[in-house]
Amino acid sequence: MARKSSNIAVLQVDGTVLSLLRCHRTTKGIEIVDHVVERGAWSTQDGTLESALREFSAKHRLAEDHLFTVLPRHDMTARILMLPSESPEEVAGMVRLSVEEYVPYPAHEVVVDQCILQKSQDGQSRVLAVFAHRDVVESHVALLKACGLEPEKILVSTACLGAASASLHTSERWALLHLGGSGIEVLVFNAGRIEFGRGIATNYDWSASPRENFEAIEELSSELRASLSAYRRESEDGEPVERVYLCSECADVAAIAETLSDTSGFECSPIHIPKSLCSKGDELLTGIPLIPLGAALAAQDRAPIVISLVPRSLSEDRERSAFKRNLYNVVGLGSAILIALLALYGQAAWQRKSYIRELQTTADQLKPIADDVAAKKKQLAVLQRGLDRTGSALELMAELFKRAPSTDLNITSMRFIHGQSIAVSGRVQDITVVDQWIDTLREASKTEIPQFARVQPGSHKQVTEGDKQVWQYEILIPLDDSEAVSMSAEEPADEQ
């Protein structure tokens, strides 16, 4: 069904609560249009949840909006990981490879998404990774599809709470406790960053008075203490949280916070929604719906943390729909273009022939110039080859001697045989000096004297000179006919 409005609708569905937050698309803050929360007791097994959602959708015309849904944390596994990369693509690959370390399912049965929370100076990243079994996500999609709805994104409550809480700009260490219709979630923040998260499934009605719901408050207190104790064990410094804030779309968190402070031993209070987060329509909100507000930011691509669990089946359906839509567009456009081409074909053919004649005339005019350029190019190539081979034997020897070691070596003779080789011999105290000389000549061949590329050691032996043992060495530089050089006298020359 075609969209008839530009509104964003954030939908939460479970067996006890149907929640809808509708807002305008803006560039700053969130402008609330409507917030509706309906409570009940429904089930997917007997079809009552589907009936309730279909009625809720028709009543509030959800199919006309850009729909985003949120799945609760306790239906899946979430981990905060430290990974050795800052690249989103590399991080995604690492998370995908480690699926079976965190959930007891094969990787192909798990829907995975991740978001980089923080990058460190040593090239690592703190990553929020979420692993959901595909049945959880696909059953959610099937329920929506049965009611004529299709979500653009399927978000996760943890990321939505983190996105909404980022606007608080507090540097203290604090915990956020969310009370949902089918579970609770505990997040710990330090200096504005998520450091810990835990989700617990429950079946309590949080809308009841704390005095009438004392058993639920006791269990809530126990789960809160267990979660914060687990955080202290896992944290690097082991410091406790300074305050616990509560939020919920379906409960009076002020009354619960007051009772929870007495039973848990933590300082608890409702969280405050800043004006920078909800710029308009905050009086329409029921409770403190941080999850829908964070989802609204994600829907507008303004959330610092986004996790989307769109299953492969839904992605494939969208790809097929997009392919059909594009195919129809292409066929229509192609038909229009074909008609236009047929109308212009005669004129185009005449223009083509005229242009060919013009090009042929120009080519005939340029041919003598091109032939002249080609001839000069060949001449330049001949000259270049001559330049590459320039250099007399004397010049080669000068370059050879210039690179000779300045100490511990003497040259007693040099022989030049036309078209064959140049040989240099002498004496040296340490034969490694000759090896270093040869390495220097070969290095020079790469950029300056190509003839030195074939330099090689000749025969060498130890001899007695005075009362010392020295090495008699020889260095050879083979020459081929194309590199043959001449000298004033093609006979062996000696240099003392």
Image (tube, rainbow, N blue to C red):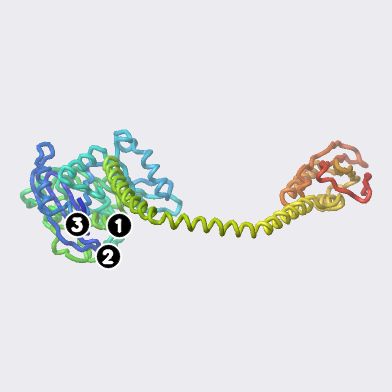
Q: Residues within 10 Å of mark 3 (few under 14, many from 20)?
A: few
Tell me if 473 is positioned left or right of 309 in this view: right
Residue 283 in picture, x, y percent from top left:
14, 64
Tell me which label, 3 or 2, sits earlier in the chain.
3
Amino acid tagged 2: Lys
Which residue carries the number 2 mark? 28
Task: In the rendered structure, find residue 301 and report the number of the disc placed on it.
Answer: 1
Tell me which label, 3 or 1, sits earlier in the chain.
3
Tell me if 390 is positioned left or right of 274 in this view: right
Which residue carries the number 3 mark? 4
3D distance between C-alphas at marks 3 and 1: 21 Å
3D distance between C-alphas at marks 3 and 2: 23 Å
Amino acid tagged 1: Asp
Q: Quadrant of residue 276?
A: bottom left
| Front disc: 3 or 2 | 3
Q: Residue at x 29, y 43 (%)?
A: 320
3D distance between C-alphas at marks 1 and 2: 11 Å
Quick one: 353 or 448, which is closer to the camera?
Answer: 353
Image vertical order of residue 120 relative to residue 168, above or below = above
Callouts 3 and 1 close, C-beta under 8 Å: no
